[in-house]
Amino acid sequence: MNNTLIKKTGVYFIGNIASKALMAIIIPIYAFFVTPTAAGNYDYWLSLAQTAAPIVFLAIWEAILKHLISSETASCQDKVKDTVLAFLIIALSFSILSMPIALHVFEYNSEMLISVYVMCWALGIFQIWQYFARSLGSTRAFAESGVIASIVTFLLILLLVCALRLQEFGLVASYVSGQTAGLVFLERRIRLLRTFRLRNASMCLLRKLLAYSIPCVFNLIAATLTLTVGRMLVMDWFGSEANGLYSFALKFANVITAVGSIFSMAVIEEGIIRAKTKGASEFYAHVSSALLVLLSALSCIALPAIALFYDLIAETEFASSFSLIPLSLLYALMSVMSTQFGSVFMAVGKTRSQATTTISALIVATFASYNLARPFGLNGIMAGLVIGTATMMVLRFLLAQQHLPFTLHPKGLWVLAVLFFLLLLALYAHPFGDTILFHSGCLLIACMFALPFALRSIREISDVPEG
């Protein structure tokens, strides 16, 4: 059994499970306590903040992981820490100075712009501290910070959104407070500010860090915009309420992509360690094949399970968004596999290839969504997202072969593809409201056929040889 990969995945799972559980729990809260308009506004603002964070901080967190893991002495680690913190001061200063300019130039209301700025700062700074914790071996602190951030966010959602009905502004305040709580906890554990020495910062090292991270900026921006462009089209053409339905359907996909990202965190670290070894190609072939089958099996199980949930909310405004679910699940599968293939570029230091493939996906998704939106509405925009993500997945797989050749051998993939298609036909053949028993039967059948494939894939990942 590959104890290193499994242990890292376990730790990161603990660190992220609270936030991922929050993503799942918040779905019924959206359905009963948040209007589609407010949900659409908040998700749009958060998308803008997620787009802005890599620009403001130049995705410096990506370089932290690469250079701290590669550092051989404590003095080298200290220099990386001090250089990054010095850069953080500069980045925050420029960001704060840009705020009044943005308020004056852009025709957005001040509440929206301030919300985007504050969420961007909270997201970026907490991300930097989390990457420091991972790189310095403080995996327990990393895990606990995620739990604390999620608990604070959830409690404030109950107070501000469910009790006080503050809608999108309650969601913003809850998100920022949760990120801040996690940041304060991490600082108390890894004490970056207490040991910070500005004179120890190195301009030469900063150039090396940014040479690695700046291509990641374009990758992260393009990845976020691939999602955001769809929301912008929905907002402009169909309004905030439609964007709320679109965002609601994507939340199920986000749960899958978020769980997949937990595994990818461990794979990237293992990839950096194994990049120059003879077993690197075998590692990626084994893990990628098993992951593809696992995601396919989980998608088959998720489809009827989500249908059951929609039976329960059949009388709410969000019920009509079920038509987007199958496409959103396909997007989730392809997105996780794209991240898996992209981890090769992170391991071998070819971050430009990762950025190139993501920008290509953005272009394809924008073109497809724009042309499919008019005839097919929200389904057309979601289909554009799927087409763009599929483009990125294929390009990353092909480019990865140039740096680290490996082959895929997903056992049972075609069986799961047929099962998904048959489940889709069965679910669309029956209306919601009085079909709970039928959807329960579909879920049972899906589990009977797909669960053995999922369990076998997990065992295969566990049996990957140590690096």
Image (spheres, rainbow, N blue to C red):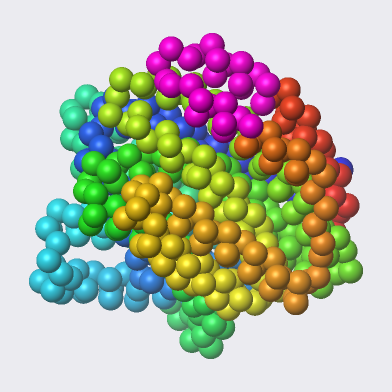
Decide if residue 374 is on the left or right side of residue 215.
left
Q: How many marks?
A: 0
In the depicted structure, whether residue 97 falls above or below residue 188? below
Q: Is residue 436 magenta?
A: yes
Q: Position of residue 147 (x, y in %)?
A: 49, 37
Q: Position of residue 464 (x, y in %)?
A: 85, 49
Residue at 51%, 72% in the rendered image: 360
Q: Nearer the viewer, residue 421 or 246?
A: 421
Residue at 66%, 71% in the rendered image: 345
In the depicted structure, whether residue 243 falls above or below residue 347? above
Magenta extent = 422-446
Q: Is residue 191 magenta?
A: no
Q: Nearer the viewer, residue 122 or 377?
A: 377
Q: Nearer the viewer, residue 254 or 273?
A: 254
Decide if residue 134 is on the left or right side of residue 31.
right
Residue at 35%, 28% in the rendered image: 319
Of all residues shown, which one is farthest toward the bottom?
A: 204
Task: Tell me which secondary structure the magenta stretch mostly adopts.
Answer: helix
Q: Position of residue 163 (x, y in %)?
A: 22, 24
Report if residue 135 is visible in the image: no
Residue at 48%, 14% in the rendered image: 435
Quadrant in which residue 193 is drawn = bottom left
Report if residue 312 is visible in the image: yes
Decide if residue 432 is on the left or right side of residue 264.
left
Which image quarter holds the C terminus?
A: bottom right
Which image quarter holds the N terminus?
A: top right
Quadrant in which residue 227 is drawn = bottom left
Q: Position of residue 65 (x, y in %)?
A: 60, 65
